[in-house]
Image (cartoon, rainbow, N blue to C red):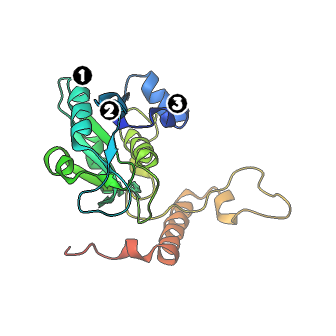
């Protein structure tokens, strides 16, 4: 899968996406990441990428012309046109379902908004999906883009290694995870649930399922409700 990122801060991506599973996926050629500096597509003397909003109001708005040139250039780097995703608090919520949908795309082009927003004409004519990672406002779309890249990469076949599968995890069946323990079996007087040491696999599986249900009921009862309209 190819992912292009349009951003004013490409340097912000070094680090989080250069370690662990994402690094391995990139090294294995499963994830092909490309960053594009939006400022390189500014044409005026000051290299401005934003301007005051028409009609007044707070803050600055990212310019449609600069973004559009950046997008055209990024797009031209590969044959696949790519799905254009704008990260913004106005977007639809990033859920496990949306992550899986996006992971099926051969190419994503992520646009990181900055300042107070993005000229609506760019959104209307160029953006396919507008995505938010939650109901809070961050200073820009860079961290949300990293979150999206991380979540999507886990669903790229082979990225988690041979045995591991995202199907066996939380949210695949809409439930939270059961608690986990490892050695030592006792630490500081703190034990481990007896059942896990019993070797009785059928009972252990029953216990895990009950724990998952109980946790979900206690912490995220919303996950147990039927989806709206369904
Ligand atoms: N940009 C600023 N806040 C954001 C959010 N919560 N999700 C996606 N992009 C954002």
On-image quarter of the C terminus: bottom left
| Disc nearest the viewer among 2 and 3 | 2
Q: Residue 7: x percent and y percent?
A: 38, 38
Q: Tell me residue 168's x, y (percent).
A: 43, 51
In this rendering, the label closer to the viewer, 3 or 1 = 1
Which residue has dot 1 on it? 77
Q: In the drawing, what numbered circle is on residue 114?
A: none
Circle 1: element type: loop
- Check disc 3 and report its element: helix, strand or loop: loop
Dividing the image into four equal quarters, which quarter contains ligand 1? bottom left
Give the SS element for disc 2. Answer: strand
Q: Quadrant of residue 36?
A: top left
Q: Foreground residue, 4 or 223? A: 4
The image quadrant where one finds the N terminus is top left
Pointer 1 or 2: first along the chain: 2
Task: Look at the numbered discs 1 and 2 and tell me whether their residues touch, using CB distance below 8 Å.
Answer: yes
Q: Is residue 19 left or right of residue 143?
A: right
> Which residue is rendered at x = 46% and y = 53% of the image?
139
Q: Which mark sits nearer the N-terminus, 2 or 3?
A: 2
Residue 157 at least partly seen: no
Q: Which residue position is annotated with label 3?
A: 18
Q: Nearer the viewer, residue 205 or 128?
A: 128
- Residue drawn at x 78%, y 51% is 184
Residue 12 seen in the current view: yes
Q: Quadrant of residue 185?
A: bottom right
Toward the front, the furthest residue is: 45
Return the residue at label 2: 4
Residue in the image at 33% along x and 54% along y? 117
Distance, label 1 to label 2, CA atoms, is 10 Å
Q: Earlier in the sequence, mark 3 or mark 1?
A: 3
Left or right side of 99 for 54? left
């Amino acid at each position: 899968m190819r992912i292009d990122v349009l951003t004013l801060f490409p340097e912000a991506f070094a680090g989080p996406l250069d370690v662990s599973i994402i690094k391995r996926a990139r090294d294995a050629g499963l994830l092909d990441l490309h960053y594009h500096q939006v400022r390189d597509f500014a044409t005026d003397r000051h290299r401005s990428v934003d301007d005051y909003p028409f009609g007044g109001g707070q803050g600055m708005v990212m310019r449609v012309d600069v973004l559009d040139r950046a997008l055209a250039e990024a797009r031209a780097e590969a044959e696949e046109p790519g799905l254009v995703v704008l990260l913004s608090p106005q977007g639809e919520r990033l859920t496990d379902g949306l992550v899986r949908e996006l992971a099926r795309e051969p190419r994503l082009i992520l646009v990181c908004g900055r300042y107070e927003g993005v000229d609506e004409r760019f959104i209307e004519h160029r953006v396919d999906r507008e995505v938010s990672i939650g109901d809070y406002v961050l200073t820009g779309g860079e961290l949300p883009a990293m979150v999206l890249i991380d979540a999507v990469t886990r669903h790229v076949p082979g990225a988690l290694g041979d045995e591991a599968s995202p199907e066996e995890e939380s949210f695949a069946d809409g439930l939270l995870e059961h608690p986990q323990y490892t050695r030592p079996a006792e630490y500081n007087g703190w034990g481990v649930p007896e059942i896990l040491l019993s070797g009785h696999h059928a009972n252990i599986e029953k216990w895990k399922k009950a724990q998952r249900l109980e946790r979900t009921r206690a912490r995220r009862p919303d996950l147990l409700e039927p989806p709206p309209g369904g």
